[in-house]
Image: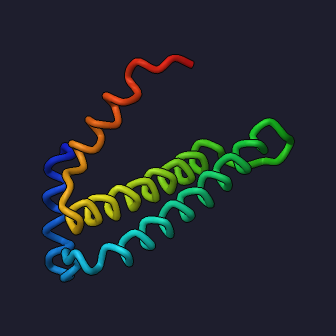
Amino acid sequence: MKNFEQLQKLTLEWAKDKNLLHAENADNQFMKFIEEVFEFKAELDFYKYFKSFKHTNIKVDYSVETVDKYNKLQLEMGDIFVTLIVLCNQIGIEPTRCLDMAYEKIKDRTG
């Protein structure tokens, strides 16, 4: 499995090949991010709904179905990361720096 930095580099190479890395595209990229968040939410809701049937008499191969639903959740989260990596590049900020700053903000919180 690749690490975050490797995946970030590959994502930015892909975005460059698609001619997406322009600051003027930041508003459109933000809307793409929002779209991906809603797609993740739809998969999350479906996953939770599916899991709620696990303890009923409905016959489903949960091992296969659950893995498929979980993989879809991961894929949608990955799409969110892609949109954020591209957006960060468009506006000139480093994603790992943003995460570091957010962690420093929350690290001492309780509850």
Specify whether 101 is left or right of 47.
left
Q: Is residue 1 something that shows in the picture?
A: no
Q: Quadrant of the C terminus?
A: top right
> Where does the image place residue 20, in percent across and percent down from the top left?
23, 78
Q: Name above or below for residue 106 compared with residue 41.
A: above
Total numbered labels? 0
Residue at (64%, 50%) from the top-left corner? 47
Residues 45 and 67: in front is 45
Residue at (22%, 43%) from the top-left corner? 96
Specify whether 21 is left or right of 36.
left
Residue at (44%, 51%) from the top-left corner? 74
Residue at (59%, 56%) from the top-left corner? 41
Residues 58 and 86: in front is 86
Q: Quadrant of the N terminus?
A: top left
Q: Name above or below for residue 87 compared with residue 59.
A: below
Specify whether 47 is left or right of 22.
right
Colour scheme in the image?
rainbow
Specify whether 70 is left or right of 24.
right
> Where does the image place residue 53, in percent across and percent down from the top left?
78, 44
Q: Quadrant of residue 32?
A: bottom left
